[in-house]
């Protein structure tokens, strides 16, 4: 049988709604298996059918880039949100006549769907050093109810190996003020993340994950609407060296978290722990915050990607609740 998918993605398995992550390096179609309850699994596979997935390369000449993206659901009804990043920048795209940064799909048991995607990259260099990341987020509309305070397996991501983007033109449709480098950001603490400090400082957990992030130590945040802003810690622990572009999202919407900037570039060093303080508008005028059911998470996307190193991948923090007082 001809294989439609060749990429490896992270295998996500939940045991009693506790997150765990492991890589499966079998040469098979990309798939994720996520345990919804102790006796029930949701499985799905996804990948690009066209252009040629054997080559993993897109071309941009000023016209729309088009992609045929396939999702095959397993034995459990599920919903997904599709996200695209170009050079670590959240990429708007179009599905049919819908313009979005997260196209949400509901699939029944064993349903297959091919999604026609088109986009013009909002930031691309005139060379071969551009990278496109595609990912699916599981059950993006989920919000905890009642006494449940955790998102569990919901909002976890499953990603393809990055694609190379070759461009013969420059595209710079975002403001140069949208990205700040870590060395220019004053609200930062950096320390060695050896075993002793990791055990004595809970936000920096010992882990085999190359990069681990948590917002507010994965604890719910209470917004004071009588205050103009709320300052929140983002903890990042790095097991590798590499440059990442980090961004913050409220209710799946990108916010200007880093002193008015959308993204912060961090050249992580191995075994170093980082604490970044970022601000969100906690007033009632914040259009990103609803009257209820608000949440927040962080994303880190590798830039200057080394295509010979499959260990470098996108990372998402756990989604946590935003409460209003």
Image (cartoon, rainbow, N blue to C red):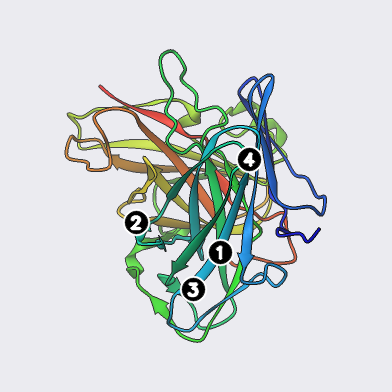
In this picture, residue 188 sits left or right of residue 98: right
Foreground mark, 3 or 2? 3
Mark 4 / mark 1, whichever is N-terminal:
1
Circle 1: element type: strand
Label 1, residues with CA under 10 Å away: few <14, some 14-19, many ≥20: some
In this picture, residue 30 sits left or right of residue 105: right
When the figure is inspected, residue 146 is found, relative to residue 299, above or below; the finding is: above
Q: x, y (%) of residue 110?
A: 63, 40
Residue drawn where x is 41% and y is 19% of the image: 145
Marks 4/3 in contact by CB < 8 Å: the verdict is: no
Mark 4 / mark 3, whichever is N-terminal:
3
Residue drawn where x is 63% and y is 57% of the image: 47
Residue drawn where x is 59% and y is 29% of the image: 201
Residue labelled with disc 4: 110
Residue labelled with disc 1: 68
Residue labelled with disc 2: 261
Residue labelled with disc 3: 65
Mark 4 to mark 1: distance in Å?
A: 19 Å
Mark 1 to mark 2: distance in Å?
A: 33 Å
When the figure is inspected, residue 196 is found, relative to residue 306, above or below; the finding is: above
Location of the C terminus by quadrant is top left
Foreground mark, 1 or 2? 1
Q: x, y (%) of residue 304?
A: 60, 67
Residue drawn where x is 43% and y is 61% of the image: 91
Residue 43 bears which disc, if any?
none
Residue situated in front as seen by the camera: 66 or 208? 66
Mark 4 to mark 3: distance in Å?
A: 29 Å
Label 2, residues with CA under 10 Å away: few <14, some 14-19, many ≥20: some
Residue situated in front as seen by the camera: 131 or 77? 77
């Amino acid at each position: 049988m001809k294989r439609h998918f060749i990429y490896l993605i992270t295998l996500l398995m939940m045991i009693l709604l506790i997150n765990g992550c492991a890589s499966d390096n079998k040469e098979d179609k990309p798939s994720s298996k996520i345990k919804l309850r102790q006796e029930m699994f949701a499985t799905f596979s996804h990948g690009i059918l066209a252009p040629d997935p054997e080559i993993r390369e897109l071309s941009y000449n000023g016209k729309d880039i088009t992609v045929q993206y396939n999702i095959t659901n397993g034995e459990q009804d599920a919903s997904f949100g599709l996200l695209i990043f170009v050079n670590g920048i959240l990429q708007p795209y179009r599905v049919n006549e819908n313009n979005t940064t997260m196209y949400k799909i509901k699939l029944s048991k064993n349903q297959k769907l091919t999604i026609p995607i088109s986009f013009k990259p909002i930031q691309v260099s005139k060379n071969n050093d551009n990278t496109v990341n595609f990912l699916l987020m599981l059950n993006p509309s989920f919000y905890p109810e009642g006494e449940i305070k955790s998102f569990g397996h919901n909002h976890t991501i499953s990603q393809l190996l990055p694609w190379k983007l070759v461009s013969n033109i420059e595209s710079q449709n975002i403001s140069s003020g949208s990205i700040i480098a870590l060395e220019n950001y004053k609200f930062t603490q950096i320390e060695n993340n050896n075993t002793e400090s990791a055990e004595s400082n809970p936000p920096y957990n010992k882990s085999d994950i190359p990069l681990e992030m948590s917002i507010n130590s994965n604890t719910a945040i209470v917004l004071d609407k009588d205050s103009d802003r709320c300052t929140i810690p983002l903890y990042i622990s790095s097991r590798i060296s590499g440059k990442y572009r980090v961004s913050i999202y409220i209710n799946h919407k990108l916010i200007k978290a880093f002193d008015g900037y959308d993204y912060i570039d961090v050249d992580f060093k191995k075994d170093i722990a980082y604490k970044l303080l970022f601000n969100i508008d906690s007033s009632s005028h914040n259009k990103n915050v609803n009257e209820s059911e608000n949440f927040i998470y962080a994303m880190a996307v590798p830039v200057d990607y080394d295509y010979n190193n499959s260990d470098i991948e996108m990372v998402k923090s756990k989604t946590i609740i935003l409460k209003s007082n």
